[in-house]
């Protein structure tokens, strides 16, 4: 037992007690996607600024098109972007706020950055910069800066404690505690003065709140949709408008409301608040969705999950698509064998790179096919792409053979018959494994290299399944559980020998094996990494749970856990 403890301790702590320095060797296969947030666009003169997954872009904005003029890589996930006078402020992750001078708009100059205390939200009011701090007690404190000098002037605790402070109108801020909304006057930078508060019972913690006039408050959220309240009575607000669409990214232009509902934008006439009227709508493909939305006059910009920036124009109360810019979608997954690296991007297929020289990777070939990416798996000379077929509108597995020169030859496809099918997982000795609810299916390639089902086994129902093979045992990790399948080398003896509850696991598995230990990780922040002792492979024993480690990778040769 002492040796087991020492081994796990060594793996976990080696990175911490030895000073690793990571140096970037190269950067390639860059794609972009647009962030799911409200403050992701800004306009100055004739230029549009937009956040991306790893930085921001600047476009020249003409009457009917956008032209990319600069692309900044901050190497961080960017959230909010705001312009104040001749300065651009961009928040990244939860800890950095960058300040750029944009006197020359197309060539921003980085002036400085500050450490943001645990939150990406910031705003300006009366010439002051406000930054929220999330304290270890999960309470909030607001910090006020002179945005010219970046000198901190004031700070104080946010009222009601468990909420950040956000601006919703000139000199007006809000604090929200679930369905309770509090409004404050912040004319003076060093204090807040209560204006009004009430519960909005139809709401479940609104994502976006704005003041439409002195007496009208607008709230929007994914769950509780779009609502307008009469707040002329400070503690007795009255609901006057309700629209059953996602209100997270609404925009109002005079008496017109633009609102999104997953794949559709709607235009409403709200001149009569008690009776909103739909004037027009426009939709995108079923495999995509709108992630953000911002209107500047009649110019409307919407970013999508597939990495598209769509430029709409409002003309005679109708949406007009001026331009669609595709950044290639976000990177999902990759697979490497020898010097061949295959990268799967959302709605962009697979790109094959030669990485024999890591400092200068060479693009060998792209493979476009009609699959919205989810993951790549494989073993030996077999590669499997799993995702959503945007033409058939079904989940699909595409099986490739990796040829001696690294090129890909498509062999066969396996599509879902109903709404869902999990991904195929390949073992070079035993075949292709697939779970379908309460059935385990085993396939092999026939003489024509087509998938042929050779065996089925009834198993406890499992979804979002991922396979880990250890000798002749398969661990199937899925939503809330792990199944242990023994004797996968003999279909006459194959059986379920164990079912282990993993209550906090949902998706995006990563794993590593070191000696007799199985490490499970996920990029789902709720999941606590698990370490199992698999010295008896059919009976994994939970050895440890580790907080805040995320995705797992192990360098077994050097005994290092990443």
Image: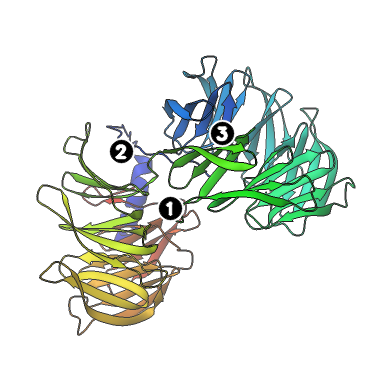
The outermost residue toward the bottom is 492
The outermost residue toward the right is 233
Tell me what residue is drawn at x 31 percent, y 80 percent. Answer: 496
Horizontal and vertical percent for residue 263? 53, 53
Left-right relation of 163 to 477: right
- Look at mark 2 in the image and give the residue it sits on: 29
Nearer the N terminus, badge 3 or badge 1? 3
Query: Is residue 96 something one can see in this rendering?
Result: no
Residue 203 against residue 541 in the figure, above or below: above
- Viewer-proximal residue, 183 or 418? 418
Mark 1 Cα within 10 Å, few/some/many (few <14, many 20+)? some
- State if disc 2 and disc 1 touch (CB < 8 Å): no
- Viewer-proximal residue, 323 or 120? 323
Label 1 or label 2, whichever lies nearer to me, is 2
Residue 107 against residue 213 in the figure, above or below: above
Which quadrant holds the N terminus? Answer: bottom left
Mark 3 Cα within 10 Å, few/some/many (few <14, many 20+)? many
- Point out which mark residue 523 bears: 1
How far apart marks 1 and 2 lie (CA) works out to 22 Å
The outermost residue toward the top is 103
State the image quarter where residue 402 is shown. bottom left
How far apart marks 2 and 3 lie (CA) works out to 25 Å
Query: Helix or strand or loop: what does disc 1 sit on?
Result: loop
Tell me what residue is drawn at x 31 percent, y 32 percent. Answer: 24
Nearer the N terminus, badge 1 or badge 2? 2
State the image quarter where residue 510 is shown. bottom left
Query: Helix or strand or loop: what does disc 2 sit on?
Result: loop
Horizontal and vertical percent for residue 189? 76, 27
- Look at mark 3 in the image and give the residue it sits on: 41
Horizontal and vertical percent for residue 196? 85, 44
Query: Helix or strand or loop: what does disc 3 sit on?
Result: strand
How far apart marks 3 and 1 lie (CA) works out to 27 Å
């Amino acid at each position: 037992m002492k040796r087991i403890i020492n081994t796990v301790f060594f793996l976990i702590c080696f990175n911490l007690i030895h000073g690793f320095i990571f140096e970037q060797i190269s950067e390639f296969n860059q794609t972009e996607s647009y962030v799911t947030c409200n403050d992701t666009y800004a306009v100055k003169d004739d230029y549009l600024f937009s956040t991306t997954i790893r930085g921001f872009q600047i476009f020249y904005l003409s009457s009917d098109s956008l032209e990319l003029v600069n692309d900044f890589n901050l190497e961080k996930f960017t959230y909010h972007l705001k312009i104040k006078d001749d300065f651009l402020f961009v928040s990244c992750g939860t800890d950095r706020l960058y300040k750029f001078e944009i006197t020359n708009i197309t060539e921003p100059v980085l002036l400085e950055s500050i450490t943001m205390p645990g939150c990406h939200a910031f705003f300006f009011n009366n010439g002051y910069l406000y930054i929220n701090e999330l304290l270890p007690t999960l309470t909030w404190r607001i910090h006020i800066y002179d945005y010219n000098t970046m000198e901190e002037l004031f700070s104080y605790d946010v009222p009601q404690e468990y909420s950040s402070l956000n601006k919703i109108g000139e000199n007006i801020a809000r604090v929200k505690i679930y369905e309770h909304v509090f409004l404050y006057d912040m004319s003076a930078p060093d204090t807040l003065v209560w204006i009004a508060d009430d519960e909005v019972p139809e709401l479940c913690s609104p994502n976006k709140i704005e003041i439409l006039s002195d007496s009208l408050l607008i709230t929007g959220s994914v769950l509780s949709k779009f609502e307008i309240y009469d707040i002329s009575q400070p503690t007795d607000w009255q609901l006057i408008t309700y629209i059953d669409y996602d209100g997270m990214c609404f925009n109002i232009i005079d008496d017109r409301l633009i609102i999104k509902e997953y794949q559709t934008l709607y235009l409403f006439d709200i001149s009569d608040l008690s009776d909103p009227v739909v004037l027009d709508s426009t939709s995108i493909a079923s495999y995509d969705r709108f992630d953000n939305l911002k209107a500047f006059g009649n110019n409307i910009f919407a970013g999508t999950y597939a990495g598209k920036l769509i430029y709409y124009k409002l003309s005679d109360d109708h949406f007009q698509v001026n331009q669609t810019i595709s950044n290639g979608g976000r990177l999902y997954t990759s697979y490497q064998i020898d010097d061949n690296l295959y990268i799967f991007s959302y709605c962009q297929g697979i790109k094959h790179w030669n990485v024999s020289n890591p400092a200068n990777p060479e693009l060998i070939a792209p493979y476009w096919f009609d699959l919205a990416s989810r993951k790549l798996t494989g073993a030996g000379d077999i590669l499997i792409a799993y995702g959503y077929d945007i033409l058939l509108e079904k989940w699909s597995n595409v099986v490739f053979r990796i040829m001696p020169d690294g090129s890909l030859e498509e062999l066969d496809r396996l599509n879902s018959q109903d709404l869902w099918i999990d991904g195929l997982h390949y073992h070079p000795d035993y075949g292709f494994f697939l779970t379908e609810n309460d059935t385990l299916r085993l396939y092999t390639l026939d003489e024509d290299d087509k998938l042929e089902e050779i065996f089925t086994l009834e198993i406890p129902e499992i979804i979002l399944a991922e396979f880990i093979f250890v000798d002749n045992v398969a661990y199937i990790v899925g939503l809330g559980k792990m199944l242990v399948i023994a004797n996968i080398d003999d279909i006459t003896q194959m059986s379920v020998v164990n079912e282990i509850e993993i209550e906090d696991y949902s998706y995006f598995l990563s794993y590593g094996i070191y000696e007799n230990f199985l490490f499970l990780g996920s990029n789902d922040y709720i999941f606590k990494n698990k370490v199992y002792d698999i010295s008896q492979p059919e009976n994994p024993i939970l050895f440890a749970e580790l907080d805040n480690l995320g995705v797992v990778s192990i360098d077994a040769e050097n005994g290092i856990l990443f």
